[in-house]
Image (cartoon, helix red, strand yellow):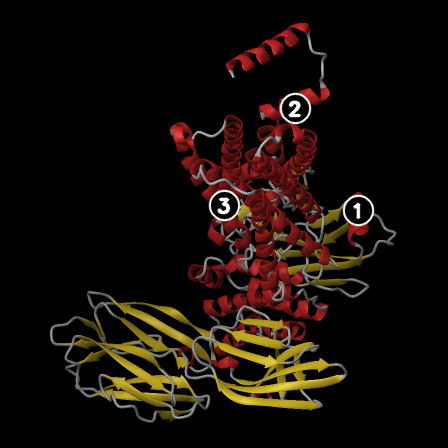
Amino acid sequence: MAFLLPQLLWEHNCHLSSASETTTLPPKTASGEEVGLSFQVGEGATDVKLYLLRPEWNGEAKEVRNGTAVVLALDGSEAALRVSPLSPDWEGTYICRFHRGEELLEIRQEVSIPLVSADLIPGISQQSMDCSSHRPLTLECCIRDRGVEGVKAAWDPGETAFADPVSRNGGSLCHRLTLVSCPDEAEAAFVCSFQGQGTASIQSTVQVSSIRAGDLFCPMEEAGGSWGATKAGRTAELLCPEGKEGKLLRNCSDGGIWGPIKGGCTSQKLLSDLHQAQLLQAGLGDPQTAVPTMLSWLDGAALGDPDSSPQDLLTTIAIMDALSHVALDAHIRLESNAVAAFLSAANKMLSLDPEAAWSPAEALDSRAASGFLQALENLTGLLLPPEQGFNLTLPNLELLSFRLSPDREDEGFLKTFNTDPPASVCIAEEELEELLRREGNLTITALAVKRMEGVLPHSHLASLVMSNAIRSSNGSVTDVVVEMVFGHWNATDREENGEERAAECVFWNHSLVGGVGSWSTQGCQTSSGTEVATNCTCRHLTSFSVLMSAGPVPNSAALTILSTVGLCASVVALMATILIYYLVWTSVVKNKVSYFRYTTLANLAFSLLLASLCFLAASRLSASHESQLCVAAAFFCHFFYLATFFWMLVQALMLFHQLVFVFHRLSMNTVVPAMLVLGYLCPLAIAATTVAATFPSRSYLQEGLCWLSARSKALYAFSVPVLAIVSVNLAVLVVVLLKLMRPSVSEASPGEERRALVGLFKALLVLTPIFGLTWGLGVITMTGQASPATHYAFTLLNAFQGVFILIFGCLMDRKVRGALAQRFCKPPPSKTSTMQSKSETLDSKAGR
C-alpha cells in the first residue's frame, strides 16, 4: 500500500523428451467458441500436466495451466481442458504427460483453429472518394497467414465470388478491390469476407463516402502524413509506419476544415510483449520463469525515445499490470535481478515529462497512473532478497528489502531512505516480535517513489510516495502497525512553493473515484512530529466489510475493534442462547409447531456461533492458497454463514405452511429430515461446489484475506443465496401478516399451536428486517462505491447479530422467560393460589 504526506511540498518452457509410451489421438479442429479436449489417463495417474507445442517454438513446449482463459480439471481417470475464447494462439499439439506407477506416459492431440476474428489485421475502415478526380480507389483487407487451408476472399458489393487472396510480405494474406467510379450511394459499405475450407467466414467493413459536386470536403494535405481528400463530417485514417501499430485519425469538420491529428501508434515490440503477458495470464506458460524473463524485457523498452507515444506508456503499464496479477495469483517470489530490471523500467517511466507523456496517457485511460503504482506495489512486494538484504537506488526510486528471522538480536525495524526530503519506515520492537512469533521468517520491503507530482491524479503537490510490503511463508501480512516519517522541505523551498500547508497523512486508495484512485485518510493518522518531520502511523486491518465487499474495505482500526468486540459479544450471547434453550426445552416444547420453532432457532444460533468463531480465526491467519488453515477457515465461514440463513428460510417456510395450509398436518418423520437437508446440506453443497470450482485455478481466496474472492466471482456463491433468502423471508412475512390479521373461522388453530405460531412470527418479524438491513448494506459494499459510514453500519449490525438473536429470539419470548423463572425461582405455593387452583378445577369440572 502506498502512503504519502501530500500537503508538504516536498515461461516455464520445457523440452519434451521421448516418453516411455506415447499415444497420438486423431487431429481435431476446434469448433464453436472454445477448445475442448479430454485425455483418458486412467485410474491412478499422478503428476498430470498439459503442454502446448507449436512449430515456431523449436521443440520447446509451454505448460498449459489454469488461467483467465483456461480451465483444467482432473476427474477420476480423465483430464479435461477447456480454452475460451478461441484464438489462433491455442493451435498446435497438446501433450498430456503423467505417471502411472514408475512409468512416464504421454498422450498427444493435434488441434487446428479455424479462421477467427482475431486473424483480421486492422486496416483503414473509412475512406472518401473524389468523384470529380477520376482517380480509382483501392480498398484492402488482410488477415494473418498461419497456414489455414483453402482460404478464399470476396468483396460485397464487388467481387462477390470467393477467390484466392493476394499474398503480401509480412506473413499476411490480403484481398483488394479497386473502385474506378464512385458508388451509387453517397455512403456505401463494402464488406470483405475471408473463408477457410469448410469453416464460417470472418468479415471486416470499409465505409466509402463519395465526394460529389457541391459537397464540402477537406483537400489533400501533407501534414504529419499524406491525408487524402476527405468528405466534410468524416474522419480520415492513416496506418502507422513500419515498426508501429495503430491508426492516426484526423477529423474533417462539417465546414470542410481539417482538425488536429489524433489517435496514436504503439511499438510493435511492446504490443508483442503485452500479448505474451496476456497469454501468460490466460494460462499459457510457467509464471516461475516467464515473469522474470518478461520483466527483463521491460528494461529494454524504448520509453523516453523521441518517437515514443502515450500509447507506448499505456502498453508498458498494461504489461506490468498483467505480470503483477500473474505473479500474485501464482504466489511466486521474485529474485532481486528481476525486480531490479522492473524498477529500472519504472525509473524511466517516472523520468517522462508529466505534461507530454503522463497527461495524454491519462486522458486515454484515467487509471494509468493508479495502475502503474499498483503494479509497483504488487511486484516489489514479491521480492525475495538475498540473505544479506537488497538495496537499490535509482534517480526516481529507492528500494530496501531485508529478511528477518525469529532469532534476530537487533531491536525493532528502522530503515531510512536517502531522499530529499528524508523519509524512514519503522516497526516497533513489540510489534515486530509478535509478528515474527506468529509468522516465522519475514521479508520486509520498503519502496520510496519520487517525482510523483503530476503523475497521480489530484496530487500536484505530492512528490514522495512510500510503499511497504511484509511477506511470510504463508503469504502477505497486513495486520501490522507501520510508522513512517516524512521530512519537510526547508524554509527556502517552502517559500518558493507558496504558503505552508498543514501536514496530514494519507494513502492512495485504488478503489476510489470509480477505480481511478484517490488519496484517503482511512486507516492512517498523523502522529505528533517535529518541525522538520511528520510521523504517519498506518494499519491495514480487515473487518466485517470483507464479507460482501467486491473491493478494498476502509483501513480503519475502529472497524476492526468494532468487529472484534461485536463478535466476542455475539459468541457469548449465542452460547447463552443455546444454553437457555437446553434448560427450558421440555417446558416450552409442547406441540409440533413449538418443536419446529425452537429447533430452527437453536440451529440458527448454533450455525451463527460457529460462523463467528471461524471468522475470528480467519482474521488471524495469513491469506494464501497454500495455507490449508486459511482455505479451511474461508470454507467453514462460507458454510456456516450460509447455514444461518438457510435455517431462517426453514423458519419462514414452516410459518408459511402452518398458516396457509392449515388442514395439512406435517409429520415429524418427514419434516425433521427435510429441515436438516435444507438447513445444512444445501449450504454445504454450495460451499463445496465453490471451493471445487475455484481452488484449482487459485481464485478461491481474496488477495490478503481468508475469504471468498470477488475477482473470480466466488463471492457471489455467498451473496446471491443470502439476498435471495432475505427476499423470500420478507415475502413470507407479508403473506403471514395478512393471514394473521384476517383469519377465517375454519382456519383457527388450537390455542397452544396458535400461540407458538405467533411467537414464531414475532421472532421472524424482528430478525428478518435486522438481517435484511445488514445484508442490504452488504449489497452496497459490493458495488465498491460504499461510503465509510456504510461499512461502519454493516459491521455494527453484522457483528452484533448474536446479541439480537439472544434478545429477540430468546429473552423476549414470554414462554422462555416463564420457564426460566419456574426453573430457578420456585417459591412455595401460597394458600390463596392453592384455593384459586382448586376453584378453577371445580369450575372446569362444572363446565364439563
Cα distance in 3D space between marks 2 and 1: 48 Å
Mark 3 secondary-structure assignment: helix
Image coords of residue 15 (percent x, y): 67, 86
Mark 3–mark 2 distance (CA, rounded to whole Å): 32 Å
Mark earlier in primary sequence (2, 1): 1
Place of residue 574 in the rendered image (x, y in percent of width and height, measured from the top left): 66, 35
Residue 546 visible in the snapshot: no
User: Of the residues tagged 2 and 1, which is closer to the observer?
Assistant: 2
SS at badge 1: helix
Q: Nearer the viewer, mark 3 or mark 2?
A: 2
Quarter of the image for residue 19 reads bottom right
- Rendering coords of residue 657 (x, y %): 47, 40
How many labels, in total?
3
Do the numbered discs 3 and 2 sit on residues whose CB atoms are within 8 Å?
Answer: no
In the image: residue 759, left or right of residue 209: right
**Residue in front for this viewpoint, 820 or 266:** 820
Q: Which residue is mark 1?
A: 434
Q: Residue at x 11, y 76 (%)?
A: 213
CB under 8 Å between callouts 3 and 1?
no
Residue at 28% from the left image edge and 80% from the top image edge: 191
Assess disc 3: are there few (<14), some (14-19) or many (≥20) residues with their C-alpha within 10 Å of its C-alpha.
many
Amino acid identity at mark 3: Ile
Q: Amino acid at mark 1?
A: Glu
* Numbered circle sitting on residue 725: 3
Residue tagged by mark 2?
A: 819
Asked where in the image residue 650 lies, by quadrant, the reply is top right
The earlier-in-sequence mark between 3 and 1 is: 1
Asked whether 489 or 607 is in front, the reply is: 607
Q: Position of residue 764 (x, y in %)?
A: 52, 34
Residue type, numbered disc 2:
Ala
Structural distance between the alpha carbons of marks 3 and 1: 42 Å
